[in-house]
Image: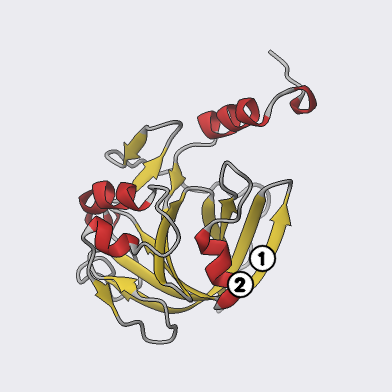
Amino acid sequence: MQLDPAVLSEKEQYKLMTGCIIPRPIALVTTLGPLGPNAAPFSLFNMAGSAPPIVMFSVGDQGDGSVKDTIQNLRHLPEFVLHICDEAIAERMNVCATNFPTGVNELDEAGFTALRSVKVRPPRIAEAPVQMEGRVLQIVDAGERHHVVLGEIVWFHFRDGIVNDRYHVDIARLNPIGRLSGSNYARIREVFQMERKFLGKKPKQVA
């Protein structure tokens, strides 16, 4: 099968992309606006750099074309806290995906505990295993209705026991979930390893 995106509807393109680009990590993002805090999950999310640590997440407009509270808040105050979602908070994360009216505090609706952040003003979620405080570097309009946020992480919070003294993250203790298509999600239950093979001459050892 070969398909030309130019002749497909946005919904058809969305189904194809989200059906095969899987699993996608989920960023539960808190922001702060004139009417208070907002929390919303985004699965168009990933790491974008490490010197400094940079993340990206993409926020689509509402069905009626209006801009979501997350983008409005980030334009008002370009700071956020990005949380990694584990299985324990999956249901409450899903509550935050509800299209509440502007001004509704999703943290309260989901039963999350808000904590003061260290370097940014939006609150962080106590129940999340990883909380990354960030500042917006750039918001890029992508296509007709998406806004890609690039942000620098300025402070990390990890639940005790997830990171060892060599800064390795224990996947089992983190227990993250990923987004598939539609209402489907994934757990990480099996991990396999492949060593990277070096082709050609081996580099000389430096004494």
- Tell me where residue 176 appears, x and y as whole percent: 31, 51
Name the colour scheme.
secondary structure
- The answer to which of 140 and 198 lies nearer the viewer is 140
- The answer to which of 173 and 61 lies nearer the viewer is 61
In the image, which disc is placed on residue 10? none
Give the labeled residue for mark 1. 139
Instruction: Relative to 186, say whether 74 is above or below.
Output: below
Q: SS class of the residue under badge 1? A: strand
- Tell me where residue 6 appears, x and y as whole percent: 79, 27
The amino acid at mark 1 is Ile
Q: Quadrant of the C terminus?
A: bottom right
The residue depicted at 21 percent of the width and 60 percent of the height is: 111
The residue depicted at 43 percent of the width and 35 percent of the height is: 180
Task: Say whether residue 112 is left or right of residue 138.
Answer: left
Task: Say whether residue 174 is left or right of residue 70.
Answer: left
- The answer to which of 86 and 140 lies nearer the viewer is 140
- Tell me where residue 67 appears, x and y as whole percent: 60, 56
Q: Measure the C-alpha gap from mark 2 to mark 1.
A: 9 Å
Q: Are marks 2 and 1 in contact (CB under 8 Å)?
A: yes
Q: Quadrant of the N terminus?
A: top right
The quarter holding residue 163 reads: bottom left
Give the labeled residue for mark 2. 75
Visible in this render: residue 50? no
Q: Residues within 10 Å of mark 2 (few under 14, many from 20)?
A: few
The residue depicted at 31 percent of the width and 42 percent of the height is: 188
The amino acid at mark 2 is Arg
